[in-house]
Image: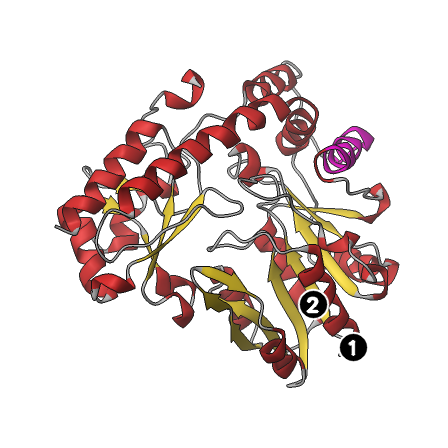
């Protein structure tokens, strides 16, 4: 655990999380502000990453590269071992990240003016990318009951009936941290088949499991009869987002061929030499690091729940997955502008405002607790101070 306790100075390292706060929060000085917003861990990547890159650097030529069978086999073995998902290596297409993959999928299978559905709150690129590509967004709020969230299939079917072309799913869900059950996924897949809708499944958080196991969307009943493309990556799992690497999985050959043609038409060349090296390293040797990380994050979450739920008007629980916590502050009676001002200027802690994830996020904050425990304590004390 000492590995995760150590605090590393990240300021002035071109870190979006630490060095972009002035721009994000419209401030002149953020030297005392603790960032707990963007989904980026403050833990060093597993040592197998630096070891693998160091070994690759011994060869002085860094020419054109490709994802060889070792990279594919490592990916396949990881998902087979961790999630009982047998991925055919011939169904994998590599991308520089899940967000670029989402853009590719939207552009490949929809056209300008098409409707794209999603449940809200939702990860901002789910809105931003289709909007930038001139698609119409159709939303359906998740149903909330006693702090639990559910897919409302009655309302979902209504948006499917509105002639949507594609539905974007987040599993595990960001920002709320839900792991959708097999039964819920099967019902969603059935709707996609019934209305002939493409299903884009963002499953980047699949390895950060806190309370529940994850069901890959492509493994549920009748998935083979649906138009599903899943997006996966090791980047959230091992804190290597700066080493761009992701995969699109399309078991339907027609979908695979369409995606492949699109990437070729746009000159997208897959992973660079260091991403190939890193993916193979983490998927073959990174499991022990992850197995230590997960209980550390759970411990951080236990502390946050105990401390913040003692504040009048605040309600937070441990999510099924991710290292993100969805804080309900509606009981305080504060408006979002007021609570954000207090957090930043009085508490000196930067959280994500809930409306960043759509109108359904009103009254909530997203908090990233993937950092050394001392920083979690600092953040919690900042929240307490802000709400005094």
Find out whether residue 349 is within the magenta segment.
Answer: no
Position in image of residue 73 (x %, y %): 80, 32
- Please tell me whether the stretch drawn in magenta is mainly helix, strand or loop: helix
The answer to whether residue 101 is seen in the rendering is yes
The answer to whether residue 28 is seen in the rendering is no
Looking at this view, is 272 or 130 the one in front?
Answer: 130
Question: Residue at label 2?
Answer: 188
Looking at this view, is 81 or 18 the one in front?
Answer: 81
Looking at this view, is 140 or 248 the one in front?
Answer: 140
For the point 76% across and 59% down, the residue is 259
Query: Badge 1, how many Cα within 10 Å: few under 14, some, many 20+?
Result: few
For the point 62% across and 65% down, the residue is 168
Locate the N terminus and report the quarter of the image it occupies: top left
For the point 43% across and 28% down, the residue is 43
**Any mark on residue 122, and which?**
none
Between disc 1 and disc 2, whose residue precedes? 2
Position in image of residue 59 (x %, y %): 67, 16
Q: Is residue 4 above or below residue 248?
A: above
**Any mark on residue 194, and which?**
1
Q: In which quarter of the image is residue 303?
A: top left
Q: What stretch is highlighted in magenta?
A: 66-81
Q: How many labels does the image show?
A: 2
Q: Is residue 233 above or below residue 332?
A: above
Looking at this view, is 22 or 183 the one in front?
Answer: 183
Q: Classify mark 1: helix, strand or loop.
A: helix
Position in image of residue 347 (x %, y %): 17, 45
Gap between marks 1 and 2 measured at Cα? 10 Å
For the point 63% across and 74% down, the residue is 153
Q: In which quarter of the image is residue 33?
A: top left
């Amino acid at each position: 655990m000492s590995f995760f306790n150590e605090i590393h100075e990240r300021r002035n390292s071109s870190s979006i999380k630490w060095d972009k706060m002035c721009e994000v929060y419209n401030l002149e000085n953020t030297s005392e502000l603790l960032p707990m917003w963007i989904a980026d861990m403050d833990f060093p990547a597993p040592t197998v990453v630096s070891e693998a890159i160091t070994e690759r650097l011994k060869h002085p030529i860094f020419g054109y590269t490709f994802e060889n069978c070792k990279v594919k086999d490592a990916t396949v073995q990881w998902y087979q071992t961790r999630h009982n998902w047998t991925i055919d290596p011939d169904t994998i297409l590599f991308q520089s990240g899940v967000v670029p993959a989402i853009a590719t999928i939207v552009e490949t299978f929809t056209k300008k003016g098409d409707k794209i559905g999603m449940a809200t709150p939702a990860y901002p690129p789910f809105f931003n990318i289709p909007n930038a590509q001139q698609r119409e967004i159709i939303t359906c709020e998740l149903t909330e009951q006693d702090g639990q969230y559910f897919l409302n299939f009655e309302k979902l079917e209504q948006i499917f009936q509105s002639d949507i072309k594609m539905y974007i799913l987040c599993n595990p869900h960001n920002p709320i941290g839900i792991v959708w059950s097999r039964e819920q996924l099967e019902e969603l897949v059935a709707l996609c088949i019934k209305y002939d809708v493409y299903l884009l499944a963002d499953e980047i958080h699949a390895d950060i499991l806190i309370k529940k196991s994850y069901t890959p969307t492509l493994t549920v009943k009748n998935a083979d009869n649906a138009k599903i493309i899943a997006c996966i990556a090791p980047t959230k799992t091992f804190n290597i987002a700066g080493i761009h690497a992701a995969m699109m999985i399309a078991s339907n050959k027609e979908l695979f061929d369409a995606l492949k043609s699109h990437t070729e038409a746009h000159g997208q060349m897959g992973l660079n030499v260091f991403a190939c090296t890193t993916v193979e390293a983490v998927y073959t040797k990174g499991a022990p690091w992850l197995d230590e990380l997960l209980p550390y994050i759970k411990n951080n979450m236990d502390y946050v729940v105990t401390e913040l739920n003692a504040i009048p008007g605040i309600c937070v629980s441990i999510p099924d997955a991710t290292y993100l916590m969805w804080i309900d502050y509606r009981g305080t009676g504060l408006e979002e502008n007021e609570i954000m001002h207090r957090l930043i200027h009085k508490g000196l802690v930067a959280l994500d405002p809930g409306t960043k994830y759509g109108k359904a996020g009103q009254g909530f904050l997203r908090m990233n607790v993937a950092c050394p425990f001392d920083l979690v304590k600092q953040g919690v004390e900042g929240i307490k101070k802000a709400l005094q």
